[in-house]
C-alpha cells in the first residue's frame, strides 16, 4: 500500500514537472536563449549567448513586453535545480588536481585577499553613503 | 560493469543521488556542510574510490550541464522579480556593486600576476566572485578552464559564507543592506544563502548584487584581462 502511494507521488511530481504551462514557459526561455546566441553570433560579441539572453529577458519583463507569469513556471524550476546543473563542472576539477597542486598556496592567497577586498569595498560604499 | 558506467544514466543518477543526500545533510546548517561543496567532494571521492574515470561520469554529467544555458536566462526573471523590491536606493547600490565587483576582478588578476601564476589560471580565476553558471560562461569566453573555475568559485562562496559577516562586523559594517550587497557581490549564491540568515533585507540585496555582479563581470572581464595581460 505504501509502495503504491510512493509511486503515485512520483507520478504527480513528474506530471507537475512537465505540465503544459511549464513547457510553454520553458519554450519562452529557449526563445530568449536563441535570441542571445543569435546576437552573439551576428555581432561577434565576447559575451556568451545565455548571458545576453538573460539581459533581454530582464528588459522584456521590465518593458512589460512579456508577463512574469508566462516565464515563472519554468524559471522557478530551473533555478531550483541550478546547483545540480553545475555540479559536473565542479567534479571536473578532479582532472586538474595535478595541474593546480603546485599552485594551491598562491591561489589561496590571491583568492582570499581579493574576496575580502571585494566584501569590504562593496559594503563600505553602501554603508557610508547610504544614509 | 564498465559498459554500465559509460551510460549517461550513471552520471546523471550519481549526481542526483549525492545532491539529494547532501541537501539533507546541509539542513544541519553547519558551515562546513555546505550542500554544494559536499556534493562535489562526495562525487569526486566516490569516483576516486571506485576508480571511475571522469569521462565516464561526464557521459551523463554533460546532459545536466546543458541546462545551464536556459538556467542562466532564467536568472533574468529572478533579477527582475527582486529588482522591484529595491527601487529605493538602486543608484547607490549599483555603484557599490560595480566598484566592488570590478575591484574583485582587477585585484585577483593583479595578485595572480604578482605571484607569477600561469596564464591559464589567471583566465580561469578572473570570474571567481560570480555565480557559478555565469562564471563558467565567462571562463569559456576568455579561454580558461571552466572546471577549475567551478571548483574555485564554489570554494570562494563557502569562504565568503563562513568568514564574510564576521569579517565585515570586525571592520565596523553594521548596515544589513551593506552586508547583503557585499556577500552577493563577493560570494554569489552561497554568500546569498548566508545573507538570508541575516534577514530578509540582506537576502534580497545579496540576490540582486549576485545577478548584477554577474552581468558586470561578463561584460568587463574580457576587457580588463585584455588591458592587464
Image (cartoon, coloured by chain):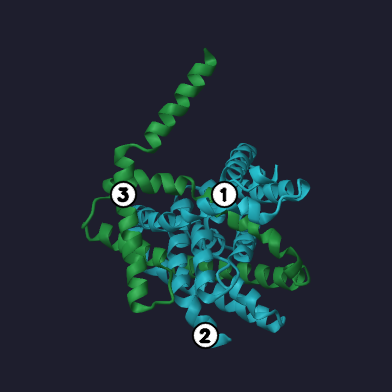
Quadrant assignment for the C terminus of chain A = bottom left
Q: Residues within 10 Å of mark 2 (few under 14, many from 20)?
A: few
- Can residue A11 be seen by looking at this rendering? yes
Q: Chain of mark 3?
A: A
- Alpha carbons under labels 1 and 3: distance apart: 28 Å
- Chain letter for cyan, please: B
Label 3: which residue?
A: A71
Secondary-structure class at tag 1: helix
- Labelled disc at residue A42: none
The residue drawn where x is 32% and y is 60% is: A32
Residue lying at the far top in this picture: please name it: A1
Secondary-structure class at tag 2: helix
Label 1: which residue?
A: B60
Q: Chain of mark 1?
A: B
- Asked if badge 2 and badge 1 are on a common chain, one would say yes
Secondary-structure class at tag 3: helix
Label 2: which residue?
A: B226
Side (left or right) of B204 relative to B171: left
- Alpha carbons under labels 3 and 2: distance apart: 36 Å
- Alpha carbons under labels 2 and 1: distance apart: 35 Å
Image coordinates for residue A105, horizontal then vertical, percent: 76, 70
Tag 1 or tag 2, which sits nearer the N-term? 1
Q: In this picture, is A85 found above or below A125? A: above
- Chain letter for green, please: A
Q: How many marks?
A: 3
Image coordinates for residue B72, horizontal then vertical, percent: 43, 58
Residue lying at the far front in this picture: please name it: B3
Q: In this picture, is B174 found above or below A9? A: below
Q: Chain of mark 2?
A: B
* Quadrant position of residue B106: bottom right
The residue drawn where x is 46% and y is 25% is: A9
Amino acid at each position: 500500500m505504501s509502495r503504491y502511494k510512493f509511486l503515485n507521488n512520483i507520478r504527480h511530481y513528474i506530471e507537475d514537472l512537465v505540465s503544459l504551462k511549464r513547457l510553454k514557459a520553458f519554450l519562452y526561455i529557449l526563445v530568449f536563449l536563441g535570441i542571445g546566441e543569435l546576437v552573439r553570433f551576428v555581432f561577434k560579441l565576447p559575451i556568451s549567448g545565455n548571458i545576453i539572453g538573460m539581459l533581454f529577458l530582464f528588459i522584456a519583463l521590465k518593458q512589460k513586453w512579456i508577463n512574469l507569469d508566462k516565464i515563472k513556471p519554468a524559471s522557478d524550476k530551473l533555478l531550483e535545480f541550478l546547483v545540480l546543473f553545475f555540479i559536473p563542472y565542479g567534479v571536473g576539477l578532479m582532472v586538474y588536481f595535478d595541474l593546480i597542486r603546485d599552485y594551491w598556496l598562491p591561489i589561496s592567497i590571491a583568492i582570499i585577499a581579493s574576496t575580502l577586498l571585494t566584501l569590504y569595498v562593496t559594503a563600505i560604499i553602501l554603508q557610508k553613503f547610504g544614509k | 560493469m564498465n559498459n554500465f558506467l559509460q551510460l549517461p544514466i550513471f552520471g546523471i543518477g550519481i549526481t542526483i543521488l549525492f545532491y539529494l543526500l547532501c541537501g539533507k545533510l546541509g539542513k544541519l546548517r553547519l558551515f562546513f556542510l555546505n550542500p554544494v561543496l559536499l556534493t562535489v567532494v562526495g562525487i569526486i571521492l566516490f569516483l576516486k574510490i571506485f576508480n571511475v574515470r571522469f569521462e565516464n561520469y561526464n557521459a551523463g554529467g554533460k546532459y545536466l550541464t546543458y541546462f545551464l544555458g536556459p538556467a542562466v536566462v532564467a536568472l533574468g526573471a529572478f533579477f527582475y522579480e527582486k529588482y522591484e523590491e529595491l527601487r529605493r536606493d538602486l543608484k547607490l547600490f549599483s555603484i557599490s556593486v560595480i566598484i566592488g565587483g570590478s575591484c574583485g576582478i582587477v585585484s585577483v588578476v593583479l595578485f595572480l600576476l604578482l605571484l607569477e601564476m600561469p596564464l591559464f589560471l589567471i583566465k580561469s580565476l578572473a570570474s571567481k566572485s560570480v555565480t557559478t553558471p555565469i562564471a563558467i560562461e565567462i571562463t569559456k569566453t576568455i579561454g580558461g578552464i571552466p572546471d577549475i573555475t567551478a571548483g574555485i568559485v564554489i570554494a570562494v562562496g563557502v569562504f565568503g559564507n563562513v568568514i564574510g559577516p564576521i569579517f565585515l562586523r570586525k571592520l565596523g559594517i553594521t548596515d544589513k543592506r551593506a552586508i547583503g550587497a557585499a556577500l552577493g557581490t563577493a560570494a554569489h549564491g552561497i554568500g546569498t544563502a548566508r545573507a538570508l540568515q541575516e534577514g530578509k533585507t540582506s537576502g534580497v540585496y545579496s540576490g540582486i548584487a549576485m545577478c548584477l555582479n554577474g552581468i558586470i563581470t561578463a561584460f568587463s572581464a574580457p576587457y580588463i584581462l585584455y588591458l592587464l595581460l
